[in-house]
Image: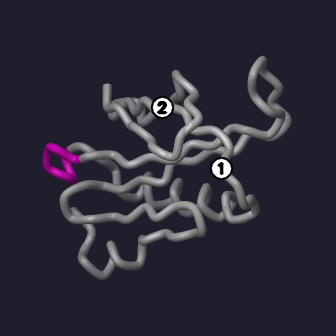
Amino acid sequence: MAPSADELQRNRFYNENWSVAMESTFLGVLVQEITMGVAEPGYPDNYAIRVGMLEVNQTYDSFYDYNFFESKVRRLYERFLRFSKVLCLPRVLYDPITKELSADQFVWDTTMEVIVR
């Protein structure tokens, strides 16, 4: 069942750099993951974070597990609050069958794309 207007309002997350909102036309998902101490060529040691919005083009309850996203969003957002700066954003791939998220391309930008395979 799709979330109510009140639930959507409660699930709006804001911070200084980001405003990711849940709206009736899409599921706005904050899917961020912070990896500390990762050293790769061209990237600082503390860089990895994922932020995304997922568009819903099919019926909500047949395609997405809202509870899965809600719990993941809340947990990761709480972790994110400990950090003040977003350094690097990857493109995120989401597999609706396995519910796996993966990043395949890092970009230095404030925009984000989420692709449903």
Seen from this angle, which residue lies furthest top? 41
Q: Pointer 2: what residue?
A: 91
Note whether 114 is above or below 74 in the view shown.
Answer: above
Q: Please name whichever residue, 57 or 42, is drawn nearer the observer in this view of the structure.
A: 42
x and y percentages locating residue 32 in the rendered image = 57, 47
As helix, strand or loop, the secondary structure at mark 1 comes to: loop
* Figure colour scheme: one colour
Q: Please name whichever residue, 95 or 49, is drawn nearer the observer in this view of the structure.
A: 49
- Residue at x 44% of width, y 46% of height: 52
Q: Pointer 1: what residue?
A: 86
Per the model, the C-alpha gap separating discs 1 and 2 is: 14 Å
The disc labelled 2 sits on which kind of residue? Arg
x and y percentages locating residue 15 in the rendered image = 58, 69
Note whether 98 is above or below 47 in the view shown.
Answer: above
x and y percentages locating residue 29 in the rendered image = 42, 53
x and y percentages locating residue 38 in the rendered image = 80, 30
| Image mark for residue 6 | none
- Residue at x 72% of width, y 61% of height: 84
Question: Per the image, is 27 magenta?
Answer: no
- Residue at x 46% of width, y 64% of height: 19
User: Does 83 sit left or right of 52 as displayed?
Assistant: right
In this picture, which residue range is highlighted in magenta? 56-62
Question: Residue 21: which quarter of the image?
Answer: bottom left
Note whether 35 is above or below 10 in the view shown.
Answer: above
In this rendering, the label closer to the viewer, 1 or 2: 1
- N-term mark: 1 or 2: 1
Q: Quadrant of the C terminus?
A: top left
Question: Residue 50: which quarter of the image?
Answer: top right
Note whether 32 is above or below 70 in the view shown.
Answer: above
Q: Quadrant of the N terminus?
A: bottom left
User: Does 20 sit left or right of 89 as displayed?
Assistant: left
